[in-house]
Amino acid sequence: MKNLFNNEPYTEITNRINNRSSETQHQWGKMNVAQMLAHCKEAFKVPLSEVKMPRLFIGLLIGWAFKKKLYNGEPWKKNLPTAPDFIIKDERDFEKEKQELVDMINRFHNAGPEKIGLYPHPMFGTLTPEQWGQSMYKHLDHHLMQFGV
């Protein structure tokens, strides 16, 4: 499984993002490309957070059952449910969202495994640095495939 801490997957992902335009159309789902970039930014706030986020009750109950799907080698299914905080419905500025997402990916990659994911994931609990790197790559890859890249 590719890991966002490794240089090759990091470069691949940032190139795929930078090769998108505001006209890129989704192949499934409801988000436009700017909303997808904003959604991915929200996901990066979790491992980059310097503040412990509360565990979700549903995560305590069933998060463990889905945890391995975050970072295993199997692709995610289309149209999976998402956390309400990660749903983006308003219109967004494509260029701004793209630049801010790339900046967050850079922060994640440059911080390295030692400084990422200091606290448990609100839904899935404690992740190793390797699992953080793999899951963040997999999330980006899933949404880039959603938009044909």
Image (tube, grey):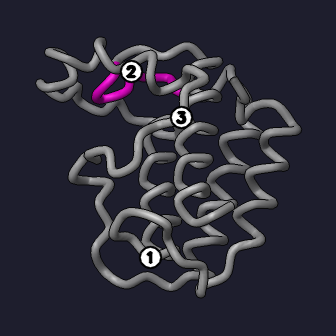
Q: Are marks 3 and 2 in contact (CB under 8 Å)?
A: no
> In percent of the image, x 34 and y 22: which residue is there?
124
Q: Residue at the location (21% across, 52% down)?
A: 84
Report the quarter where the N terminus lies. top right
Q: Position of residue 96 (x, y in %)?
A: 58, 79
Provide the secondary structure element on which disc 2 rests: loop
Quarter assignment of residue 21: bottom right
Local crowd at mark 1 within 10 Å, few (<14), some, or many (≥20)? some
Which of marks 3 and 1 precedes in the sequence? Answer: 1
Q: Are marks 1 and 3 in contact (CB under 8 Å)?
A: no
Q: Secondary structure at mark 1?
A: loop
**The disc labelled 2 sits on which kind of residue?**
Pro
Name the kind of residue labelled 1 in the image.
Asn
**Residue shown at 46% from the left, 39% from the top:** 49
Which segment is the magenta one?
A: 117-124
Residue 120 is tagged as 2
Quarter of the view holding residue 92:
bottom left
The residue that label 3 is drawn on is 75
Query: Is 47 situated above or below 1?
Result: below
Distance between the Cα atoms at labels 1 and 2?
Answer: 30 Å
Residue named by callout 1 = 32
Q: Secondary structure at mark 3?
A: loop
- 50 part of magenta stretch: no
Query: Which label sits in the foreground, 1 or 3?
Result: 3
